[in-house]
Amino acid sequence: MSLKVAVLAGGDSAESTISRSSADEVLLNLSERHLVELIELDENITKNITAFGPDVVFPVLHGPPGEDGTVQGYLEMLGLPYVGSDVRGSALAMDKYVAKTLFREVGLPVLEDLLVSAVDAHESSVAISERFGTRVVIKPLRQGSALGVTRLPNGGDVCQSIMDARSYGDTVLVEPYFEGKEVTAGVLDLDGENKVVFPVTEIELPDGEWYDFRHRYEVGRSVHKIPATLPDHVLEDIANYAIKAHECLGLRDLSRSDFLVSSTNEVVLLEVNTMPGMTPTSLYPDAARAAGLSFGDLVDKLVVNAMSRTTNVSYPRGA
């Protein structure tokens, strides 16, 4: 079945460059089977979508407003079926504090945390020290790709770290520092089929490094080991946690859960991404390939699945 697919990309998100890279890969692979058009998330989006008249939309957008429910609500107002989670699921997953609150309620392993929203960074740093000591991780509440995240495994300038995180939003999430391997588990959730968890992926990094923005997107700065070098029972636990987190947030189509695993095999869930990266260095497509699903087949399944969802709202079509 050949479809008209609008691939949304870019916008003014801090992750817009990554969005465009992901969208280029999606566009390249979908164009082999469908009529595809790349549409920028800008002031001309409605005009351009109307002119193209897509059957389905693939919003390859990272961070707000493309991944927090805003664009999803816009597409629902237009009556356009789209790939990915709906408004509620997208909004819940994007807010790290709200997501972790829900994770706790269903027994998923997460770290303690503290929300910091006071204007005075010094006052906030005192509260953090009293709660967690000096070894902490400070991150924006609603941002992806590790942007604005500071790890302080040996202590450091908490005030400056708070200010760095606040450049991505007023509210900051603080967690105690947890030493461990960085691993991920991708979920594929197609309507009418059993949910699939791709092989757990371990991110290998040079000593002393962590999976920051550069190591995520610069070729050669990290290695994806699939499956992760962990005991079978730990791999099984992580897969189950990924499914449970996906279901807890009410997600659909796809997600990727990020974890840390300590040297004693203690697992903690960090967050869930509703639109994982699709760049040449991204984790989700690599894990899909390890499961025997090519990138072309993956994105084709996602758009066909989204198209199968019915809508009661008519939407504008191009001539």
Image (cartoon, rainbow, N blue to C red):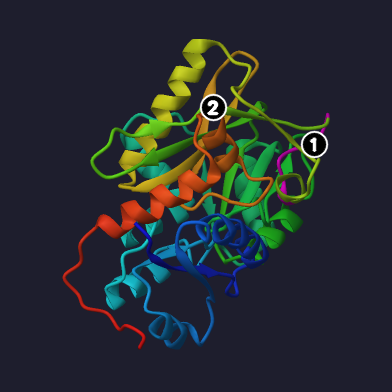
Q: Amino acid at mark 1?
A: Glu
In this view, the residue farthest toward the right is 207
User: 138 or 34, which lies in front?
Assistant: 34
- Please tell me which of labels 2 and 1 falls first in the chain: 2
Q: Which residues are magenta?
A: 207-213
The quarter of the displayed image where residue 90 is located = bottom left
Q: Position of residue 166 (x, y in %)?
A: 64, 63
Q: Amino acid at mark 2?
A: Val
Q: Label 1: which residue?
A: 209
Residue 58 location, quadrant: bottom left
Left or right, 214 with reference to 25: right
Question: Which sits in the foreground, 68 or 160?
Answer: 68
Principal SS element in the magenta part? loop
Quadrant in the picture for the N terminus: bottom left
**Residue 130 in which image quadrant:** top right
Tell me the SS state at disc 1: loop
189 left or right, relative to 20? left
Taking the spot 54% from the left edge, 45% from the top edge, the residue there is: 295
Residue at 39 percent of width and 64 percent of height:
69
Locate residue 216, reporting x and y percent. 70, 46
Tell me which residue sits at (47%, 12%) in the image.
Answer: 233
Q: What is the distance, in whole Å, between disc 2 and disc 1 at their CAs? A: 20 Å
Which sits in the foreground, 309 or 223? 309
**SS assignment at label 2:** loop
Q: Is residue 105 highlighted in magenta?
A: no
Image coords of residue 249 (percent x, y): 34, 46
**Dot label at residue 200:** 2
